[in-house]
Image (tube, rainbow, N blue to C red):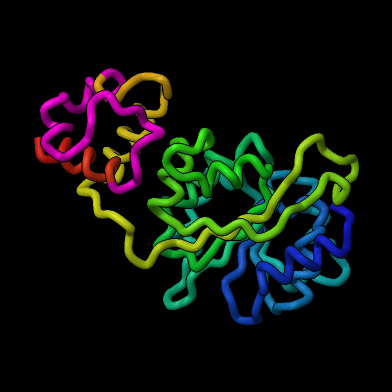
Amino acid sequence: MHDDYIIDQIVSSINPQDGEHLIEIGPGLGALTEPVAEAVTHLTVVELDRDLATRLRQHPFIKEKLTIIEADALKVDFSSLATPNMPMRIFGNLPYNISTPLMFHLFDHCQHIQDMHFMLQYEVVKRLCAGPGDKLYGRLSVMAQYYCEAVPVLMVPPTAFKPPPKVDSAIVRLIPHKEAPATVQCIRTLQRVVAAAFNQRRKTLKNSLRELIDDAEMIDIGIKPDARAQELSLKEFCAITNKICEN
């Protein structure tokens, strides 16, 4: 990323403040790392690439401010980085191939997170924010919205990068809910239900969820067995989950 105006806009949207527990995932060549580190006295970064991590350790201006975790972010226990009374603020330009699994990994640590700002493909941001009936509404939409409020912040054009990608990017802000919008007895069961329901989108619930719940039980909680996954709200997925957990 080389567009200084876009970089300034991204940093402004993150709004880093000194004394906060800031963590960057995948700093790369430091396009965001440098301006954020200049604004604060300490920044933790998670970088898998050994050469890039070494480059940051030798950075002439910000190396003293950095704690560098040389690891795969998908395997980092972010709860172990948490400190009492100081929730984490996480940001990064996430590679497309790991963006979804990484967000699911971070959702497990939401109780320790104040907010997250990620640059993603624009279509992924639209999926995060999609609601029932939207063709982009799916597993990521439901689970992200269970854990967080998703807010699109900034469009990032291909020209902000060298070489320019073929798709638009966008910044999204994910703010973990202080209280979940719906309660479930078992979060792992909710994850199973949502994954099964969206695994074959064209199937009705009576077919996609037949291993988990029968038609009579769905009717009992006001869910039509002939409905499809993309028609259900988060609260309805939670109702199905709780019905399964009763058994």
Q: Position of residue 20 (x, y in %)?
A: 58, 76
Horizontal relation, residue 28 to residue 193: left or right: right
- Residue at point 88% right, 63% down? 4
Residue 217: quarter of image: top left
Image height of 134 relative to 30, above or below: above
- Residue at point 11% right, 36% down? 220
Q: Which is nearer the eye, 61 or 89?
A: 89
Q: Position of residue 13 (x, y in %)?
A: 68, 68
Horizontal relation, residue 194 to residue 36: left or right: left
Q: Split into 4 quadrants, where in the image is the C terminus?
A: top left
Q: Does the magenta stretch include residue 57?
A: no
Q: Where is residue 42 in the image (x, y as percent from the top left)?
A: 67, 74
- Residue at point 21% right, 26% down? 212
Q: Which is nearer the eye, 186 or 153?
A: 153
Residue 16: quarter of image: bottom right
Total numbered badges shown on the rendered structure: 0
Image height of 45 relative to 167, above or below: below
- Tell me if residue 99 can be seen: yes
Instruction: Give the magenta range.
Output: 207-235
Q: Position of residue 54 (x, y in %)?
A: 79, 53
Horizontal relation, residue 243 to residue 48: left or right: left
- Residue at point 11% right, 27% down? 216
- Tell me if residue 46 can be seen: no
